[in-house]
Image (spheres, rainbow, N blue to C red):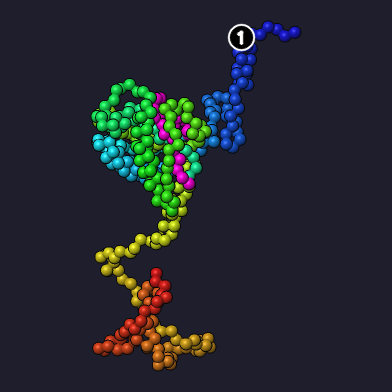
Amino acid sequence: MAGPLNQSDIDKLVAEAAQASAPCVFRSDGTKFQASNQVTPRPFDFRTPVLLNESELRRLRGIHNGLISTVTGRLSSLLRADLSLTLNKLTAMPYAAFADSMKNPTHISLFKIDHLPGIGILEISSRLAISMSNRMLGGRGITDDVERHLTEIEIALLEEIVDIIIQEWCRLWRDDRQYTGRQIGSENNPRFLQACSNDTLMLALTIEAFAGESMEQIQLAIPYNMIEPIMKNMQSARDKNLQTQPDAKPQQWRNSYNQISVPLIADWQVPGVALSDVLRMRVGDIMEMPKTTLGSTRVRIANAPRFQAQAGCENGHVAIQINSEITNANIV
């Protein structure tokens, strides 16, 4: 029978039990992390990958800046008030995260775009929605600080504003198709909204609206499967445009080029000579040339044939007269 355990034996058993309960974490090469390393595994959801890179997001931000400028003008004219809209951010996020960012209560409009899948979401904060509907009824657009649900009359008045934003968004895309949007419903509480699954990737556009001294928020969310066909068409049109454009920039002449020395050679193409005659050649030998040789002088610039010329004499000097250009010259 074993004797009683002392304190050191107990500490050793406790340490072994703690080490055994720790999760096993491995590196990419298959080696195991030591117990002394402070490694905390975290879950990663591969169902929501980032499908838009930073370059595509930057391009979309530039496109939606044009949307905000157009919508600002149309809404200011409709409301007969000075309305300022600015782009706050444009990001890609799961639908669950976007739903958490919406206020409660708020005004949410659901819409569909013809020829495109998915359902888009437009959220207007309740204070801004009440202020807009008040202006449309001839009021001053001043609201209380308390947020509340919209009445049926206010929701009906906002449909015109929502239509303006949706149609202007459809006009952003220069495509063969004419996109048209239509409203399919509205909601005032994001908890009851079931537009898509929680892991659906959304392109979320956040707009800051300044009406007087107050700042409110408008959010436009487009599911990725809705905008994906448009992005593909834009990319194919961009690739086609790049193929039609020359790769090299047009050459520009600089004054520093004037002093560059370029070798120029005038020569003739003579008939072939037998190898035995070449071996018998000596200094002083005379080679007979055809009479048309001088008229078939070839001018080479930087060792590339460029002109056909006539060789002869001019004012006591040997000279050549350029007659034509060699069109298939390989200029380097």
Residue highlighted by disc 1: 7
Q: How many labels sit on residues? A: 1
Is residue 98 on the magenta stretch? Answer: yes
Identify the residue at horizontal 33%, vertical 64% (top origin): 251
Q: Quadrant of residue 98?
A: top left
Picture residue at 50% right of the left edge, 87% below the top: 273
Q: Residue at x 30, y 22 (%)?
A: 145
Q: Is residue 257 visible?
A: yes
Please state the extent of the stretch shown in magenta in the rendering.
94-115
Q: Nearer the viewer, residue 304 or 326?
A: 326
Tell me where residue 266 appears, x and y as whole percent.
36, 81
Placement of the N terminus among the 4 image quadrants: top right
Q: Is residue 59 visible?
A: no
Residue drawn at (46%, 53%), measured in percent from left and top? 236
The C terminus, quarter of image: bottom left
Tell me the kind of residue under disc 1: Gln
